Amino acid sequence: MHTEPPTDAHSEGRRTRLAWYSYDLGNTTVEFAIPLYLTTWIVNDLGVAAWVFGLASALSSWAIGLSGPYFGVRADERRTRRRWFTMSVVVATILLVSLGFLPRTGTGALVAIVLTAMVANYFFQLSSLIYNASMLTAATGQNVVSVSSAGLAWSFLGGAVGVGIIELVISGKLIPALSGRGYAFIPAALFFALCALPGMYTGRLWQKKSDIVDIPKGSLHSRMRALWRESSREYRAGWFLAGYFALNSAIQGLTLYLPLYVQWVTGLEGPTLLLAVGIVVVFSGVGAGVVARLRPDNRRVRRIILLGLTLLGLNAFAFSLASSLPVVVFCASLHGLLSGALVPTVRGAFAQTFRSDYQALAFGLFGAVQRVSQGLGAALWPIAGSLAEGGAASWGVASMGVLALIGVPLFSRWQFGKTDYRPTVSEPARPAENNPSSDR
């Protein structure tokens, strides 16, 4: 059977999506390195109290959550998303690399390490918010949730490759002077920056100066309120973000402390602990890959979120009672499978709740919920543990299950559109006269 060769537009769209996926590859390397290396290095090796690190992580997350929407709306209206993205990647890379060379002796040195890590995390997360604003452009002509899921499925492969590179470096076999977990972020940051380069130089992902942005009248806050009312009336976006707050708190809180919990229950250390956590990574990629293959319509997206969140909560309760290695590995793998399916599904769904010319604002708000909820997960675990007389880590896991189940009735109030939204390259901004919630 004769098949037509791919058109230039098709090839260009594929290259654009590959560039968009590339950032996810590097991003997840850093995301994995935080619980696998940064947490264990700072808490176990340097002796910083877990609650101090948890609070510092929460503050860093809350800072990006509070400022992200403002950076987003400015980047949308001034068409400077690429500039913000590039700056954030460069600053985050420099700070992450510097962690391995900071002094490690004395209280002042430990404070400097924690502060540097938190500022680096701020810019790392800011780059992610701006990057997600290009999702609709990358998904042109494709199912948005499928593209989001494919990006994260590839990213777990990148995370696994990144962890392998990190292990090679910190083993001292590659560069003897860089042995130990304290140098883990040198290869992680460099791999992250390398993977961000294709996105920086793919012009189709970013705004052009000639692009028209339909800016509502009024001050910055009034413009944001007008855009929020629009999405709320059409999709009940408030219920979506409330459900996502609970979902992300549960996923990120458990994931952040997962290596410590597995180590506490099983006694595993070193390569065996890494292997156990690596299984979670594999299943996360499987979960995202399944959703990418499904190409779910809006009704199926809703089912994936509600069912997946319910199972995530129940699995957390079972995880908190686990006392043997096989049960721990099974529950951890199921956590990876469910979170790998849920996170990109929610990310792709939210991309369709805001206008295409205000995607950085959309993901600024999404990121605000993401980072503030991540901060709750980071802080709630040690708080739950400190209130318990015994089995502190188990109480932390159980608290994540409670958060997950709270998200189910919240997401059930969310109203998704009846048809898939597939923007075209030349889609114009919606005129203000058709926007009933505009201030005009």
Image (cartoon, rainbow, N blue to C red):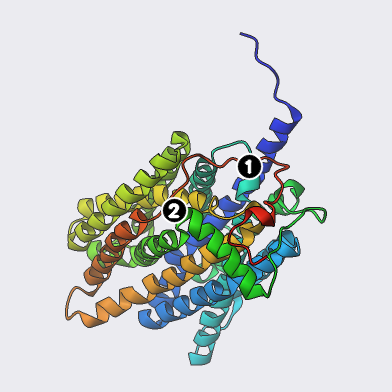
Residue at 32% of width from left, 73% of height from top? Answer: 381
Mark 2 crowd level (few <14, some 14–19, many ≥20, 10 Å Cα): many
Inspect the image, locate mark 2, and give the three-letter code of the amino acid beneath it: Val
Q: Is residue 399 above or below residue 419?
A: below
Which of the two labelled residues, at mark 2 and mark 1, occupies the earlier sequence position?
2
What number of labels is visible? 2
Q: Is residue 317 above or below residue 286?
A: below
Residue located beneath label 1 in the image? 423
Q: Nearer the viewer, residue 328 or 147?
A: 147
Whether residue 214 is visible, yes or no, is yes
Mark 1 crowd level (few <14, some 14–19, many ≥20, 10 Å Cα): some
Assign the N terminus to one quadrant of the image: top right
Residue at 59% of width from left, 40% of height from top? Answer: 422
Assign the C terminus to one quadrant of the image: bottom right
- Whole-percent x, y for residue 177 in the image: 58, 69
Q: Nearer the viewer, residue 417 or 245?
A: 417
Q: Closer to the observer: label 2 or label 1?
A: 1
Image mark for residue 343? 2
Q: Nearer the viewer, residue 127 or 295?
A: 295
Residue at 55% of width from left, 59% of height from top? Answer: 230
- Locate residue 101 relative to residue 273 in the image: left or right: right
